[in-house]
Image (tube, coloured by chain):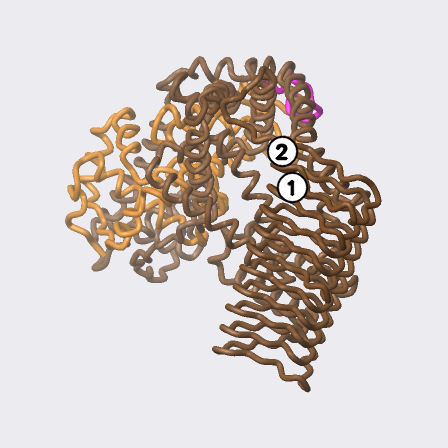
Chain colours: A brown, B orange
Amino acid sequence: MSDQQPAKHLDEFTLLMYVERQLDRDAAQEVSLHTQTCTRCLTLLRALDRESRLLTRSMLEEDEPLPLKLSQFHEKVKRSLGWIWGVVFGLAALGVYALYTGYIEPWQNQLEQAGFGGTNLLSLMVFQSAFWKGWQSMFSLVEFVALSCVAGFGVFAIRRYLRRGTALAVMFASLGLLASFATPASAAEFRKSESVTVGKEEIIKSDLYATAEHIRIEGTVEGDFFGFGTSVEISGHVAGDVICFCQSLRISGQIDGNLRSMANNITITGTIDRSASTFTEMFTIDPTGKIGRNLTSFAKSLTIDGSLGRDLLAMFAKGTINGSIGGSLSARGENLTINGGASIGGPAKFEGDNPADVSSNAKLASPLEYKKLEHKSHNARGSGYYVWTVIWTAAYVLFGLVLLSLLPGFSREASQNVENVGASFGLGVLVFFAVPIAAVIACITVVGLFVGLTTVFLWYASLYFAQIIVGATVGQWILGRAADTWGLIGRMVIGICILRATMAVPYLGMWIKFGVIIWGVGALSLAIYRRLQPTLAPNIPSVPMTPASAPSAPLPPNTTVGGY
Amino acid sequence: MSVPGITEPKDLIVRARAGDTQAWGELYREYAPAIFRFCRRAMPTREDAEDATMEIFMKLREKLGQFDPSRSFSAWLYKVAANHCWDLLRRRKARHDKDMEDVEEIPLEAPEPNQLERLIEERSSEEVRKALNTLGTRARMALVMRYYSDMSYDEIADALGVRRPFVGVVLLRARHDLRQALQGSGALAVGGTQ
C-alpha cells in the first residue's frame, strides 16, 4: 500500500456498502483499488467493519436470562387449553340460551301475533318491505355489495403496499376493469326547491327523490317516491313504494307498493295496495282510505275508519277503530275503543292500562283478549333477576373469551385505549350516536340497505364488546397488566364480574352501564382508527454517493464482492 | 442466518408441524432465548420484549404449517419475529414517534476515521446495548435485523416496508445515531470528507 493520497475520498455510504457486500463487482473493484492507495479511506473501511462486529457481538451477548414467565409460558398454554374449551362450550350453550330466550323468542312471538308467522325479521324486512325490488334488481345489489366487500378487503390487505406505485397502478387498473363490467345504475330523478309538484299529466318513469317544503304528487311516479319535506300530499299514482319523512303526509291517491314513513301526522283517504309501517303522532285511515295488507304503527293517536286488508300491529296512547280489519289485531297502549261499525276478521288482543271499550255492535271474529299492561318497576327485582344477571354475566364472559381468543392483539390495543380516558369518551359519544344515524341514512337508499344493516349489527355488537374491553382493563387495574392473552382473559373475567355487579345497582347501575358502553365503544373505535392508519411512508433522503473512478486492478485478497 | 449454537432441528420441526405438542415444547425451549434476545434488542422495554416473544410463538404455532421445510427454520423464525416486532413498533410509532422523519432530513457527514476507530475501541458491549435503546424505532430495528439476525437487505426491506436501495441508507443513519448516542451529539460529525 502506498501513502499516496488521492484528491477525492470515498464517501462513507460506499464504504459501508462495500463492507456489507452490497456493491456490484465493478464498484467493489473501484473501492478495493482506492483503499490500496488511500490510508484515510482504508482506516474508515476498517472502522466500519469493526463497528459491524462490535454491533453483532453486543447484541448476541447473553446479558439476561430467559424470564421465568417465558420459561413457563409453553407449559402454561398447554395446561390452559385443556379446560378452557370446556368452559367455552359450556358458556356458549348458556349464552345461546340467554340470547334465544331474551331476544329471539319474544320477537318471534310478537311477529307471530302480528300475523307474520313462518317468517323471521330479516326475511320480513328484506323480502316484504319497501326495499325489495324484485330478484333482478336484488341480484345487482348483491353483486355490488359483493364487489364492494372484495374491494374493501383488498384495500385492507394491501394497505401496507399502497404507497408503492405498482400497487396503486394495479388497484386503479382493477377498479377500471370492474367499472367497465359494472351494470349501469338505474335512473332516478331528483327535485329540490321550495315547492315540488308533479303535475296531473306528468309521468316520471323512474324513482323520484324530492326535497321541499311542500311536495305534491298529482301525476304518476312509475318508480319509488322518496320525500323529505314539511307537507307531502299524494293525490296521484305511485307505482312503487313511498318512503317519506315529513311533518304532514296526506295520501288521497293510489300507491301500488308499501308506505314507510316517519311523520307528525298521516292521513290516508286513498289506497295503499301493500303494507304500511309508520311512526307518527296521529295516524288516520279515513272512511275512504284503504291499506291492502298489514299495518304496523307506532302512534300517539291511531284511528282506523277505513279498511285494512290484513293484520294490525300497533302501539298507541289512544286507539279508535270504526272501520274493518281483515286479519288480526295485536295492540298495546293506554286506551282502545272499538265502535259499532268496526269489524275484525281475526283474533284480537289488547294489552293496555284500561280494558278496551268494545261496542256490542262491533263484529269481532273472536272476543277481544285483554291483558292489563304491567309497568315494571326498576326496583321490583325478584330472585329471577339475579339469576339472569348471573346468566348474562356468563354470556359476557363467553363472548369475551371468544373475542379475546380470536382478536388478542386488537383486544389488547383496545384495552390500552381505555386508559386514554378523554379520547375514548369523546370518540365514544360520537360513535355511539353518529353511527346509528349514519346507518339509518344508508338504509334509505337501496344500495345502502346492506351496508346500513351491517353497520347497525356491528354497532350493536360493539356495545357488548365495549363492556368486555372495559372489564379487561378493570381486571388489569386490580391484578396488574397481563403479559399474555390468557392473562388478559383472566383479568377480563374478573373485570366483567365487577362491572356487572355494579350495573345491577338500582338507578345508578343504568348510568354506569351507559358510561361503560360509551367508554368502551370509544376505545374500540380508537383501536380501529389506529389500525386503519397507513404505515408511515419512509421519508429517506438520498445519501450523497461519490461515483468512484474506474481503475481496473485486482481485488484485495479475502474480499467478497456484491454478496458473491 | 442461524441462531448461534443451534443446529437446525429438522426432525423436531416436522413433528411439531404434525401437531406433536412435546416437539413443539422442545422447539420453544430451543429457540425462545434467542427470540427473546432479539425482541429485547428490538423493543423498547423488557416487558414489551416478553410480550412480543410470547405473541411470536403463539403466531408461530399457528403458522408452522406454512413453513417450507426445505428452507432455514431460523431464517423463517427471525422473519416472523422481525415482522411482528416491527408491526408493534410501527403502530406505536404512528402514535408517538413522529419526530424521526424530521431528523432524517438532516444530511449526514462522514466521520473522522481515527475518531471512529477510537470510539469503537473504547466502548463496551454493554454501552452499545444501552445506546441502542436510545435510538429511534426504525434505526434500532434495522440494526437488530442486520447485525443480530443477519437478515438480508431484501428481507429487511420487506419487513420495514422500504425499497431495497434504502436499506443501506437506513443502516448508515442508524449507525450515525448510534455513534451520537455513544459519544454525545455531533461528536463524530466533524471533518467530513467527500
Mark 1 residue type: Arg
The answer to whether residue A277 shows anywhere in this view is yes
Judging depth in this view, the residue of B191 and B44 nearest the camera is B44
Mark closer to the chain start, 1 or 2 = 1
- Residue A373 is tagged as 2
- What range of the chain is rendered magenta? B12-26
Q: Is residue A563 left or right of residue A81?
A: left
- Count of number-bearing discs: 2
Rendered residue at 58%/47% (across/down)? A456
Picture quarter containing residue A67? top left
Query: Which secondary structure lies at badge 2?
Result: loop
Residue A102, position in %: x, y? 65, 30
| Secondary structure character of the magenta stretch overall | helix
Mark 2 residue type: Leu
Contact, mark 1 vs mark 2 (Cβ under 8 Å)? yes
**Would you name the residue on which mark 1 appears?**
A332
* Residue at mark 1: chain: A
Residue B190, position in %: x, y? 15, 48
Query: Which secondary structure lies at badge 1?
Result: strand
Residue A502, position in %: x, y? 44, 22
Residue A358, position in %: x, y? 72, 44
